Amino acid sequence: MGLFKNIFSSEKKETLDKGLEKSKTTFFSKLGKAVAGKSTVDDDVLDNLEEVLVTSDVGVKTTIKIIERIENRVAKDKYLGIEELNQILREEIAGLLSETNIGEATDFEIPKDKKPYVLMVVGVNGVGKTTTIGKLAYQFKNKGLKVVLGAADTFRAAAIDQLQVWADRVDVPIIKQSMGSDPASVAFDTLESGVKHDADVIIIDTAGRLHNKVNLMNELTKVKRVMQKVIGDAPHDVLLVLDGSTGQNAFEQAKQFTAATEVTSLAVTKLDGTAKGGVVIGISDQFQIPVKYIGVGEGIEDLQVFNKYEFVDSFFK
């Protein structure tokens, strides 16, 4: 069981356990029905397990991978009891996540050779993008880092106002212009200010409109190009925020955004209010983009750095 050792504080692990409670309860209720009356992992169990995983929002492609891995285990071991299925699932899902989340962080940290570290945040409206930015700013500031926010979602006045609320709450500076301003101009000003004031981290909010993928692509490309006039290799991370409670819709959003721009990491929010926690497994695997953060509560400290072993342990506990 060494793979599943705790590396979070007990308080954070408790928050994670609680945040995944609905997903876990629903999953094991379905799993219990799938294996009822069975003593060994046979074809019927695997067929039922496939249905359980798909209906738990793991996604079809990822489910097939998991089932194939378990079939290989069954073929090797010849006889696998139902009581072992839980542990096998844990190991195979952790293994699958390991292929994407290589070298994952264990804390809110930034590369020491990038200063300022520029994080561009993308995602549709309503997924918790602004909240995620605010919570990231809080965590980075708690690490003793100087943080600057850039309100480059100028399409909605509410987006600017919401980011201002978080900037005030966390007590970090925000660079903004009026609604309708050029987002690239806001990003440029934010990076200039960050460099001037020796910031460690710059977080840029961007518009979350998907009604026209070409416009989104052009806008994000322009924002990146203009940022590079100030910092040549910016942004250092493009973080896509997805609402875990939307299940398969989160897959579609990931598909749209990864087609529109390069995405280098993911944050999956609102996992505490849903039974769709399996979406984390599927999205991470299907898009081969590491999940960096997960939201497991409404509190300012309830954004956690994603750790595959802790996640799987909480899900299958």
Image: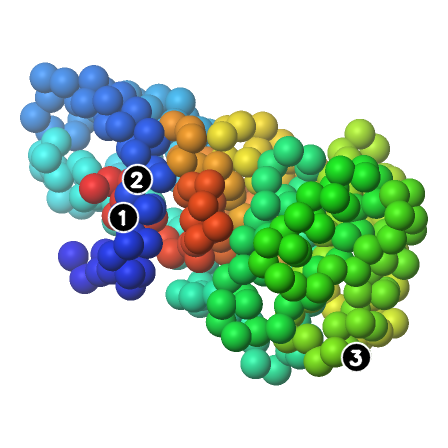
- Name the residue rendered at 91%, 51% in the picture: 182
Amino acid identity at mark 1: Glu
Label 1–label 2 contact, CB within 8 A = yes
Q: Which residue is mark 1?
A: 14
Amino acid identity at mark 2: Lys
Which x, y percent locates residue 109? Answer: 50, 70
Q: Which residue is mark 3?
A: 196
* Image quarter of residue 157: top right
Q: Which residue is mark 2?
A: 18
Marks 3 and 1, how far apart at CA:
41 Å
**Quadrant in the picture for the C terminus:** top left
Label 2 residue SS: helix
Label 1 residue SS: helix
Q: Earlier in the sequence, mark 2 or mark 3?
A: 2
* Image quarter of residue 65: top left
Which x, y percent locates residue 252? Answer: 62, 32
- Name the residue rendered at 54%, 48% in the picture: 267
Amino acid identity at mark 3: Lys
Pair 2/3: label in front: 3
Q: Is residue 229 left or right of residue 267?
A: right
- Name the residue rendered at 44%, 57% in the picture: 305
Q: Could you classify mark 3 by the number of other residues whose Cα lies within 10 Å: few (under 14), some (14-19), or many (20 or more)? A: few
Marks 1 and 2, how far apart at CA:
6 Å
Q: Is residue 2 left or right of residue 8?
A: left
Vertical arrangement, residue 88 with respect to residue 185, above or below: above
**Quadrant in the picture for the N terminus:** bottom left
- Name the residue rendered at 77%, 53% in the picture: 151
Vertical arrangement, residue 37 with respect to residue 251, above or below: above
Q: Is residue 30 visible?
A: yes
Vertical arrangement, residue 132 with respect to residue 192, above or below: above
Marks 2 and 3, how far apart at CA:
42 Å
What colouring does the structure picture have? rainbow
